[in-house]
Structure formats: structure tokens, C-alpha cells
Image (tube, coloured by chain):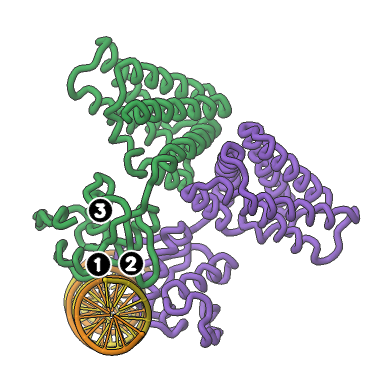
Chain colours: A green, B purple, C yellow, D orange
DNA sequence: TCTGCCTTAAGTGAATACACTTTATCAGTT
DNA sequence: AACTGATAAAGTGTATTCACTTAAGGCAGA
């Protein structure tokens, strides 16, 4: 990891997180880790990072500590921070954990009901998905578009669960390298079609106030994503 | 919060976490927060803490950041750290989340099988519980003893799940103030009896390699603890 | 040549100093 | 009396420095 971070991004006119370099550093290191430009197990040298990012070690350390809290880095006393390893089994497990947690989230949502705003976001994402899928096949870029639609749907459900701890845990599951939803370049049209149908049913269960059915549907939904991923990974060997 | 932390604990002869004051500070602050001597919403003043604990602000900040990562504190830029609020509904929710996660944990354990060591710990904790309960009633201190037995059982299962992310999340659930297993001063003999029977059945399901039955039993197990707590809390008003 | 120790460089841990932001206080005004 | 503004105090953010630990390299002895 020589200089993956050194594009001295202007950030001049109050970039993101202006006024707090630690948070800015945090974002950039996280980005680098998630997109794999630092590689697992690698040690993060504080002085090198601080030189690369042109800040002192203090905000660097703060950022690394925070990222360790997110579970992205490991820390050992007197030995500093390393990029946490995510062996394949752990990545697969993350889907089971996520399935369980998102199941609880939609159960909560069904118990508590949707706010007008959440309802609108969800219906819009469902409609957008319908529109995108009605052609019967995918063109270039469609998958990227659906990725955002999918993200909106899940985020809205998370908000509807109205529980912070749950949101944070699910967020951690999504941030497991490779498990990230941004890496769903692996699905065919009919996969997406099926998943979008899942979304419709989950939404119906929520508005019908059927918490346990909603939970079950969501667990199955995420479990099927896991299955697809496992299949994809095993045939790539 | 004047001086809850100031008993200048000797710690001289290589106390816990010697050689790393940040970790030591972290333990002490966490302790103070969990036992409620700091109270929710309160702001943690860095200079005051550093004076109280006789260290500089640097390790104090490190500790606070790490505790924020554990979800115990909140952070706002230029405003520092505050003790996170856990309203009653969030505490109750934590049990649902925990039930779900521990369910996944025992499912994993049943899928993967128990190591000899884990098996031994579990069987010992089951036997110890049997012995403690065979008298048919509780005496003073028995509940405290059972608390440890209970802790061993759950910890061994966690280890058997062999998944770090899962362990950490469950640990967070256990560290929710009031939700902590140390505050189970609320149960009668027959409650404990019932829960201990749950433990036996869960263990049987695991050794029989019945993952989904094990998960279901564990979910129900934790859910019933939640129910007891809710009942206890609502009758105290 | 290999082993073990010693030296030294590299890197993290902690303390201190200073800059900047926020918050509280107090005039002065309406 | 309430509000606005300036000002001072308090508190956090960052940089720098030194102390300590760990890891690496070389040298001596077997």
C-alpha cells in the first residue's frame, strides 16, 4: 500500500466533514479498505498515513480507533491497527446474521407501522423497480440503478424499525468487505425480478401489520441472496 | 458526577491492562457507565476525567472513542462525548435483537459441532445448575451463583458459534444498561428452574445436530426473559 | 554457519502546547 | 424585563514532543 490515498483531494472549499479532520480521515481510510486497495491483514502505519493525508498522527489515530469500533480494523496494544481479515466463511455468516437482524427490523416496522415519509419512499422504490423490470430484461447500467432502488428500500425499512442499535448492527453487516451491497454485480435479470417480488410481499406484510410474516419473508429474502452468492463463488473456482 | 472514579486504585504492580492507560481508562469509564454512576445523557468532560484518573487527555480520548464504538457513548463533533440514552423501549428491543442473534449463534454451534472444551464447560454448567436447583428453593446468594453458571453457559455457546462479528454484537446487547445479565435480581426460583430446563434442551438440540430447533429454543429462551423483565418493570409502576 | 545477544531504527503510547469552536456571561439597548 | 451583541471562559481539535515498546540488523561466540 504505497500511495493509494494520496490524491490530494481539494476538499478546499469545505469538503465533506469540514472542520473535523478525524472524520474526514476516517471516511477515506474506510473507503480504501472497503474497495480493497489496502488488503486484509495489512498493518496501517500511523506516521505514513499522516504524511500521506497531510495531517498529524492525532486525527489519524482517532480515525483508526473509530474504524476499529466499526469492526473494520483490529487493534493490538503497542502494535497498532491492521485491516481485519474476513475469511470466506465469515462473509457467508454475515449474510445469516444480516438475515436475522433485518428480519427483526421488518418485524419492528410491522409492529410500529410506517410513517408517511417512509411509506412514500418504499412505494416509490417499488414503483421504480416495477418500471425498470417491466422491459423483461436488463441493459447496461440497469443493475447499478437497481442497486440504488434496493438500497432505498432497505434503508427505509431500517428507519421504520426505529431502533438505533439494530440499524448500526445491520450497517456493520453491510460493510463487510465483498458482502457490501455494492458488489452485487453477480445477479441476472430473473434474480432481480424475484427479489423485487420479495420486496412487494414484505411491504404488503408490513402494511397488513403481520410482523411475523414480514420477518419470515425478510429472512428468506436475505437467505436467498446468500445462496446466490455462495453459488456464484463456488462456481468461480 | 463529581468524583465517582477517583479512588486512586493502586494498580501499581501491573494492574489490569498495564502498559496501556487507554485500555485501563476504558474499563473504568465503562464500569462507571454500566453501574449507572454517571447517568444517561451526561456529558463526559475530557479534562475533568483526565484529572480524576491522573492521566493526560490523550488516553482519555482514546478510551472514549473506543467506548463510542461499543455503542455506550455518543459523539458529536466539537461537543465531545455523552453517555448514550437507552429509553425503556430500546432496552426491551435489545432483548429481541439478542434473542435473534443468540438464536443464530446456537444454530451455528449446532451446525459446526461443539469442541471438547466447550462441551465440557457446558456440561459442567448444566450439572452445577442441577445441583443448585435440586434443593427446590433458593437461599441468599444462590441467585448470584446461578448468574455465573448462566454466564458460562452462554459464553461457551458463543464460542462454539465460531464467529467473531456475532460474538461482538451479542456482547453489545449484553452491555445495554439494565439489560446486563448482572441485573437479573428479578427472578424467582421457578423462573430459574424453567430457564435451566431451557438450557438442557438447547444443549440437547446442539449435540443432536438440530440447528433450527436449537435456534428456535434459544429465541424462545431469551424472549421469555424479556417477557419476565417487561412484567417486572410494568408492575413496578 | 548458526545461534544468541546487543545495538539501533522504526513505531506506538502519552503528555503538553496551542488553535479553534462552543457556550456562558454581561453590557447595552429596545 | 427581554433581547442582542460582544467578550471571556471552558472545552474540544490538532500538532508536536518525548518516552517506551517492538522489531530488525549486525556482531561475537560457539
Residue at figure coordinates x 47%, y 79% from the top left: B18
Residues at circles 3 and 1 in contact by the CB criterion of under 8 Å = no
Q: Chain of mark 2?
A: A
Q: Disc 2 marks which residue?
A: A80
Identify the mark nearer the N-term, 3 or 1: 3
User: At which x and y percent is residue A173?
Assistant: 41, 42
C22 vs B127, left or right, is left
User: Mark 3 or mark 1, which is nearer to you?
Assistant: 1
Above or below: residue D29 compared with residue B181: below
Q: Disc 3 marks which residue?
A: A27
Q: Residues within 10 Å of mark 1 (few under 14, many from 20)?
A: some
Q: Disc 1 marks which residue?
A: A46
The picture quadrant where one finds residue B108 is top right
Above or below: residue A96 compared with residue A163: above
Residues at circles 2 and 1 in contact by the CB criterion of under 8 Å = yes
Count of all numbered marks drawn on residues in the image: 3
Q: Chain of mark 1?
A: A
User: At which x and y percent is residue D20?
Assistant: 36, 84
Considering the image in quadrants, where does the N terminus of chain A appear? bottom left
The picture quadrant where one finds residue D27 is bottom left
Residue at figure coordinates x 72%, y 57% from the top left: B149
Residue at figure coordinates x 10%, y 57% from the top left: A8
Residue at figure coordinates x 60%, y 46% from the top left: B95
- What whole-number distance in Å separates the C-alpha atoms at marks 2 and 1? 8 Å
Q: Is residue B66 visible?
A: yes
Amino acid at each position: 500500500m504505497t500511495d493509494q490515498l494520496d490524491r490530494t483531494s481539494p476538499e478546499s472549499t469545505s469538503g465533506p466533514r469540514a472542520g473535523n479532520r478525524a472524520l474526514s480521515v476516517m471516511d477515506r481510510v474506510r473507503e480504501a479498505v472497503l474497495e480493497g486497495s489496502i488488503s486484509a491483514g495489512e498493518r496501517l502505519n500511523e506516521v505514513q498515513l499522516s504524511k500521506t493525508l497531510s495531517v498529524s498522527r492525532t486525527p489519524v489515530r482517532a480515525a483508526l480507533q473509530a474504524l476499529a469500533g466499526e469492526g473494520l480494523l483490529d487493534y493490538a496494544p503497542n502494535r497498532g491497527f491492521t485491516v481485519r481479515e474476513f475469511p470466506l466463511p465469515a462473509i457467508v455468516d454475515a449474510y445469516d446474521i444480516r438475515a436475522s437482524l433485518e428480519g427483526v427490523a421488518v418485524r419492528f416496522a410491522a409492529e410500529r407501522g410506517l410513517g408517511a415519509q417512509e411509506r412514500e419512499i418504499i412505494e416509490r422504490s417499488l414503483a421504480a423497480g416495477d418500471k425498470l423490470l417491466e422491459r423483461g430484461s436488463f441493459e447496461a447500467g440497469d443493475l447499478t440503478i437497481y442497486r440504488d432502488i434496493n438500497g432505498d428500500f432497505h434503508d427505509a425499512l431500517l428507519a421504520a424499525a426505529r431502533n438505533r442499535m439494530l440499524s448500526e448492527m445491520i450497517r456493520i453487516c453491510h460493510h463487510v468487505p465483498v458482502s457490501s451491497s455494492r458488489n452485487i454485480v453477480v445477479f441476472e435479470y430473473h434474480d432481480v425480478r424475484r427479489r423485487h417480488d420479495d420486496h412487494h410481499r414484505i411491504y404488503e406484510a408490513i402494511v397488513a401489520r403481520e410482523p411475523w410474516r414480514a420477518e419470515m419473508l425478510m429472512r428468506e429474502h436475505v437467505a436467498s441472496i446468500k445462496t446466490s452468492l455462495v453459488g456464484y463463488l463456488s462456481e468461480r473456482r
